Amino acid sequence: MKCNEIVERIPDVAAAFSNPTVEESAHLAACSACAEKLKAMRATMSLLDEWQVPEPSPYFDTRLHARLREEMAKPQPGWLQWFRQPVLAATLTVIFGLGIGLYFTPAQRMHRVDTAAAVTAPTGSAVDDLQTLDKNHDLYADFELLDDLDLQQDVTANP
């Protein structure tokens, strides 16, 4: 028999709920660690058997009944109190949801520009060039990545 098998049964044996089997008795005689665990568990059980439960205060029942009468005498909240809390919770939930929704909306939706009202610059002017660069920023950023990739390939090809 292994130690981990008998350790599961030590509390039952120590509390005298069951007697050890022949195999368990032989293991306890041979294994000093398991025998020590059984001895310590029996000592703990005997201390628990000697423990006396403290008596409750003689005024406990009187105080409990007085407290219950006080709570029953308090005015009960009206229907407005019960209605107000769920409505407040629902309102806060909707506000929270709207806040999250507005936070995660793309910036393009938040800053729409009316194309009819936008002033167009003459073609070929500096303002027109800047507007074109601003509109196509993502496209030009990708071209810069391609340029960096071409430079890396040139360096590896011509060491």
Image: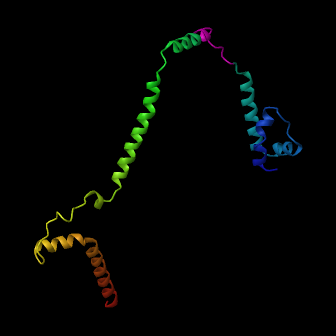
What is the count of numbered marks? 0
Query: If the image is split into quadrants, where does the C terminus sit?
Result: bottom left
Q: Which is nearer the eye, 79 or 44?
A: 79
Q: How far from the left and from the top, in percent, is residue 33?
A: 74, 43
**Which image quarter: residue 110?**
bottom left
Q: How is the image coloured?
A: rainbow
Which residue occupies 29% across, 80% down? 148
List the single residue furthest toward the right.
22
Left or right, residue 84 beside residue 18: left
- Dominant secondary-structure state across the stretch colored magenta: loop
Which residue occupies 33% across, 86% down? 153
Q: How far from the left and from the top, in percent, is residue 18?
A: 84, 35
Q: Which is nearer the eye, 23 or 53?
A: 53
Q: Which is nearer the eye, 66 or 84?
A: 84
Magenta part of the chain: 53-62
Left or right, residue 104 beside residue 47: left
Q: How far from the left and from the top, in percent, is residue 87?
A: 43, 34
Q: How far from the left and from the top, in percent, is residue 134?
A: 21, 69
List the single residue furthest toward the bottom.
158
Which residue occupies 15% across, 74% down? 129
Compared to residue 104, the image places residue 97 above or below, namely: above
**Which image quarter: residue 112?**
bottom left
Compared to residue 119, the image places residue 155 above or below, namely: below
Magenta segment: does it hold 77?
no
Magenta segment: does it hold 61?
yes
Q: Which is nearer the eye, 55 or 145?
A: 145
